[in-house]
Image: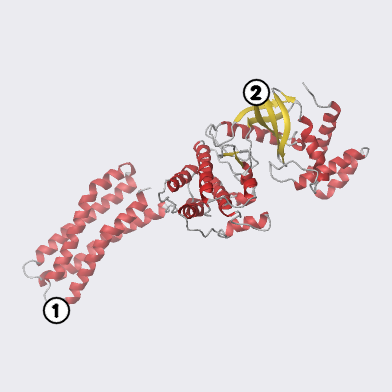
């Protein structure tokens, strides 16, 4: 078994300890700290300054390893060299072959599983943070979150290893470009975007069904496998439920994630759920369709400000059915109010599947249930009051209709009382007997419609039977009949569906 150089490992541990201490110092005191801590070792001082510079410029988790032509080569050379110390060594039953990527948060290696004879991806805490217990605990939580999912569109986790005070996640190695790599060639065709969107939504649906919210979905974290399908990587910022609780993988009271892909509520530090992933998916799909960001700003701060305040810009102008359908779906994903987005990856997937099947996807934002219920209650009371009020003109015209006046009034009064009683019963059932509401709604429906029809008929009969010279009252009764009819066959069914058919 090949082992790292002991002296080099000791020097690395010393360097990372000084690095952590330097980060804990105020920025204006770091130079003095470095001068004191490395006063007798100029080489150590140079390496520490280089590591701090690299930390300031570090990007996302899966950056490409630096090349000799990189303008920041002098700042990152040592950092990469430290990360590559494990290359060619055995870590437990795994042999590390190469460095796949690194960033400020961690490193990913390509390795061989010596027991099962397969290639694996091995993720570890970045060398400069290897002694940070919070980051090690975050890696453990990520492993648990990802291991809870077994899905073909999510890179699998095989094992969590803790060796020599280091924590490693061993998972599926997926060879292929990320969606960010693909975007460098321009937008994808609408058909390709739809297929990719279905894969993403399918993966999110599986995660959300297990109570897992990714919170950092972006093109860098989605890779195109050799079969053309995509897989989601990196659950390092995920939140998930375990034993009835929702533990935090990341530190509380911080805005965590990639700013350009955060939902408004994530930026505001409000509680987030699956709808934050839906928003991020909308941003990714917008980019795939247009090769530009919907809230593009000059920097992270301006991009976040646009996410909070502005509407997406740069929508495609094509009229193809698939492109138009995708645009409608993405618009709903990017709603600033989470209540107006798809509620989860499953609902998003249903809309995408409908589009693929040539059907019209359901993309209208949901109606506010509480508001719809208030409108339904108001309609019941207003209708009941209108019926009672219309008995007054019917009583007035009673003596003007020879022979039939009393009968018309009595029939109208009976219909009005029946409609009033049935509506009051519905109000009671909806508020006090919610479990029985649907049954009561079905059973009272025919009776209520019959009462409404009889009431309309009496209004029309009274208007027709009025003698000449009573045109104003006839017009009033006719107008009332039309209003009651429209309320019964148009308005009431619509308010009832909005309030209860959810």
Local crowd at mark 1 within 10 Å, few (<14), some, or many (≥20)? few
Local crowd at mark 2 within 10 Å, few (<14), some, or many (≥20)? few
Q: Are marks 2 and 1 in contact (CB under 8 Å)?
A: no
Of residues 354 and 386, which is closer to you in this image? 354
Task: Tell me if residue 300 can be seen.
Answer: yes
Give coordinates of residue 217: x percent, y percent.
Answer: 59, 44
Of residues 146 and 222, which is closer to you in this image? 222
Q: Residue furthest bottom?
A: 469
The quarter of the image holding the N terminus is top right
* Quadrant of res 401: bottom left
Give coordinates of residue 327: x percent, y percent.
Answer: 50, 54
Of residues 331 and 325, which is closer to you in this image? 325
Element marked by disc 1: loop
First in residue order: circle 2 vs circle 1: 2
Give the number of marks.
Answer: 2
> Which residue sits at x=64%, y=48%?
258
Asked if 14 appears above or below 195 in the picture, the reply is above
> Which residue sits at x=20%, y=73%?
475
Q: Residue furthest right?
A: 40
Q: Write down the residue under mark 1.
A: 469
Of residues 101 and 311, which is closer to you in this image? 101
Picture colour scheme: secondary structure
Element marked by disc 2: loop
Q: Is residue 10 left or right of residue 169?
A: right
* Quadrant of res 411: bottom left
Give coordinates of residue 198: x percent, y percent.
Answer: 50, 43
Q: Residue furthest left?
A: 403
Q: Is residue 135 left or right of residue 489?
A: right
Q: Write down the residue under mark 2.
A: 117
Asked if 382 appears above or below 273 in the picture, the reply is below
């Amino acid at each position: 078994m090949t082992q790292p150089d002991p002296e080099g490992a000791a020097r690395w541990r010393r360097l990372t300890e000084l690095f952590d201490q330097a980060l804990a110092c105020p920025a204006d005191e770091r130079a003095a700290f470095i001068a004191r801590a490395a006063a007798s070792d100029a080489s150590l001082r140079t390496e520490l300054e280089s590591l701090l510079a690299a930390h300031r410029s570090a990007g996302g988790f899966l950056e490409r390893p630096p090349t000799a032509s990189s303008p920041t080569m002098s700042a990152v050379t040592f950092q990469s060299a430290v990360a590559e110390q494990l290359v060619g060594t055995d870590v437990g039953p795994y042999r590390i072959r190469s460095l796949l990527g690194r960033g400020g948060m961690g490193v990913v290696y390509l390795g061989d599983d010596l027991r099962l004879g397969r290639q694996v991806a091995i993720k570890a805490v970045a060398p400069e943070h290897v002694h940070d217990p919070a980051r090690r605990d975050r890696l453990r939580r990520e492993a648990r979150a990802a291991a809870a999912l077994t899905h073909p569109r999510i890179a699998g986790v095989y094992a969590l290893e803790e060796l020599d005070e280091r924590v490693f996640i061993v998972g599926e190695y997926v060879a292929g470009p990320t969606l960010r790599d693909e975007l460098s060639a321009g937008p994808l065709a609408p058909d390709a975007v739809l297929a990719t969107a279905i894969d993403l939504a399918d993966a999110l649906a599986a995660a959300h069904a297990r109570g897992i919210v990714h919170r950092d979905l972006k093109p860098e974290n989605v890779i195109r496998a050799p079969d053309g399908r995509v897989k989601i990587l990196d659950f390092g910022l995920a939140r998930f439920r375990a034993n009835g609780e929702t533990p935090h993988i990341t530190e509380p009271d911080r805005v965590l994630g990639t700013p350009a892909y955060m939902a408004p509520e994530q930026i505001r530090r409000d509680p987030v759920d699956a709808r934050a992933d839906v928003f991020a998916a909308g941003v990714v799909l917008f980019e795939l369709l247009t090769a530009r960001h919907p809230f593009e700003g000059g920097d992270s701060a301006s991009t976040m400000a646009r996410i909070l305040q502005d509407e997406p810009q740069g929508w495609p102008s094509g009229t193809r059915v698939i492109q138009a359908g995708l645009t409608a779906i993405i618009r709903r994903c990017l709603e600033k109010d989470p209540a107006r987005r798809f509620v989860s990856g499953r609902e998003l997937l249903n809309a995408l599947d409908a589009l693929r099947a040539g059907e019209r996807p359901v993309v209208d934002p949901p109606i506010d249930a509480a508001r719809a219920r208030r409108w339904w209650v108001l309609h019941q009371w207003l209708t009941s009051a209108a019926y009672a009020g219309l008995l007054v003109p019917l009583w007035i015209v009673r003596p003007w209709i020879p022979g039939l006046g009393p009968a018309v009034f009595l029939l109208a009064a009976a219909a009005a009382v029946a409609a009033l009683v049935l509506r009051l019963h519905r109000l009671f059932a909806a508020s006090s007997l919610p479990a029985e509401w649907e049954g009561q709604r079905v059973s009272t429906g025919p009776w209520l419609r019959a009462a409404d029809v009889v009431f309309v008929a009496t209004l029309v009969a009274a208007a027709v039977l009025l003698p000449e010279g009573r045109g104003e009252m006839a017009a009033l009764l006719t107008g009332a009949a039309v209003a009651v009819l429209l309320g019964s066959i148009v308005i009431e069914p619509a308010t009832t569906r909005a309030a209860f058919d959810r």
